[in-house]
Image (cartoon, rainbow, N blue to C red):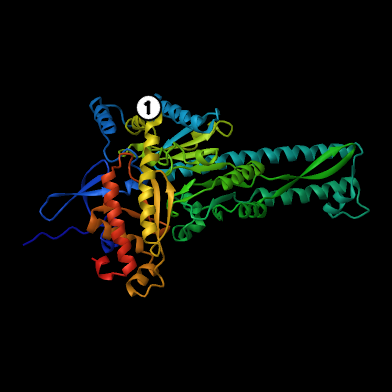
Amino acid sequence: MSPTPERELAEPYMRTMLASAGLDVEYVRAEGDTLYRLDDQGREVPVTDFAGGYGSLILGHNPPEITDLVRELLDRQVPVYAQTAHHPVANRAAQLLNAAITRETGSVEPYFAFFASTGAEAVEAAVKHAEFDRARKVAALRTEIAEHVDLAGSAIAEGATLGAAERERAGAAPSHTAEQVLSALVERLRRHNEQVLSRPPAYLSLEGSFHGKLVGSVQLTHNHGFREPFAAMAAQARFVPLNQPDALTKAVDELRAWVWDLEVEDGAIRVVERLAPVFGAFLLEPIQGEGGIREVTREFAERVQDTCAEIGCPIIVDEVQSGMGRTGSFLASSSIGLRGDYYTLSKSLGGGIAKSSVMLVREELYRGEFEMLHSSTFAKDGISTPIAVRVLETLEAEDGAAYRRAAERGERLKSVLESVRADFPDVVEDVRGRGLMLGLEFRDTSESPSEVFRFLAEADILGYVLSGYLLRTHGVRVLPTASAVNTLRFAPSIGLTDEAIGQLETALRDVARILRDRDEQALTP
């Protein structure tokens, strides 16, 4: 009698979805850009991995420089969790991060580091810190205006006057005394200011953005399906079309607000309007990952920088997928001249082994008290932090040889994707990205004569089915981007070989032929 199979309790719905596309494969070993699964006889079967842990594997699976370090740490019995203690290795990691940012941006202003475990956690920390700083600005503004109101009261007692505009704003009658007018004006000022300053913070994000799926970060993620079920739980964002500077200006103009203040000058009291600190932050990825591998242009980055400086809105640059050298530079944002008030990094910071992330905030905005309000149990632990240091040292070694390698391998891979596009223009819509963060978008099949291909488009699963076919038939592992599933992403390591690129080209040409010929039989398991 055969044993009863165990009931699937670990995300069974996801397992079913993966199985429907042929992606429910168990991998038993990994090295470089290769995963291994077992066949029916228990033999290892290699799979070339272009998914790259969603960008977590800039050094590949189980890189020797990292696995050797982990063994050394375990042999030394380092304290993995010794919270509320001095962590000099974390400071070393922060110093290396700053050195890389300084080299690429030219800025000598230091960034203070808050370590965490995941990219979404780093984003949440940045948003929380930005709101902590904004709340301080609101409190300071309230205090300053209250002081000015008191000064106006003293000025009235000494014979100061109020002009016609102030009397009209106060709704005063001609017979009202200056004291009565001021009293009414102050009451209206307080009501107006309270209405403005008690609003939830205004967040700006980009259409196509992905910043995580936690309570706060999911509201900054554009994908409606991820965001809408939890809309009541956190402040909402205003999503701006990518690379449309005028749309950004329009959004800002609609969101900005002013408070009233009082000014005494030459024996007269007048109302002045001051820009209110209503903007929480502008979050953007220099290259959108889940949005289909779409790049922010230099022109748009300049408008973002100038606009945010004008309205006092901090910029959070999300480099969780695009950072750590993947695009040929440590930060993808540095190539378009974008400087962040905050940076978030993760994924490859863990060397393909650890879960690690960091939020960086520049010195002018840094608030030390925040460290007492925000913490992470697994931050700065005795394994992930030394790994982060080793990863950063590896990337920076030989005057940044890893970055040059990423750029060169990326150019080679992109040229192959472009050649597939050129030979199958009716099937391939676009090739996008930079370095080893690339995407190939297939054309929409919603109007295909094939009922199967129409269904794949309507169900929004074409990319997953294509990924299953590539895995099953060619031993190539790719995955679509989450919010643009017709786009397959490619995020391999800097160790990517020409042989692996050739294997991928053969596989993609096969898929393109199937789509061109509407070969339903070949595509379905």
SS for callout 1: helix
Please identify the quadrant where the N terminus is shown. Answer: bottom left
Pick the residue in front: 160 or 237.
237
Q: Is residue 236 left or right of residue 120?
A: right
What count of labels does the image hold?
1
Residue drawn at x 50%, y 55% as measured from the top left: 233
The kind of residue on which mark 1 rests is: Glu
**Is 392 displayed left or right of 10 in the figure?**
right
- Residue in the foreground of this view, choosing between 262 and 308: 308
Give the x, y percent position of residue 67: 26, 33
Q: Is residue 257 left or right of residue 132?
A: right
Q: Quadrant of residue 322?
A: top left
Residue sitting at 52 percent across and 44 percent down? 127
Q: Position of residue 341 (x, y in %)?
A: 55, 38
Instruction: Please tell me in which quadrant of the rendered image residue 493 appears.
Output: top left
Instruction: Tell me where residue 75 sits by quadrant.
Output: top left
State the residue position of label 1. Answer: 398
Q: Is residue 280 above or below residue 464?
A: above
In the image, residue 308 sits, relative to residue 420, either above or below, namely: above
In the picture, which quadrant includes the C terminus? bottom left
- Side of 445 where 305 appears, left or right: right
Which residue is depicted at the point 64% across and 47% down? 278
Residue 139: image x %, image y %? 65, 40
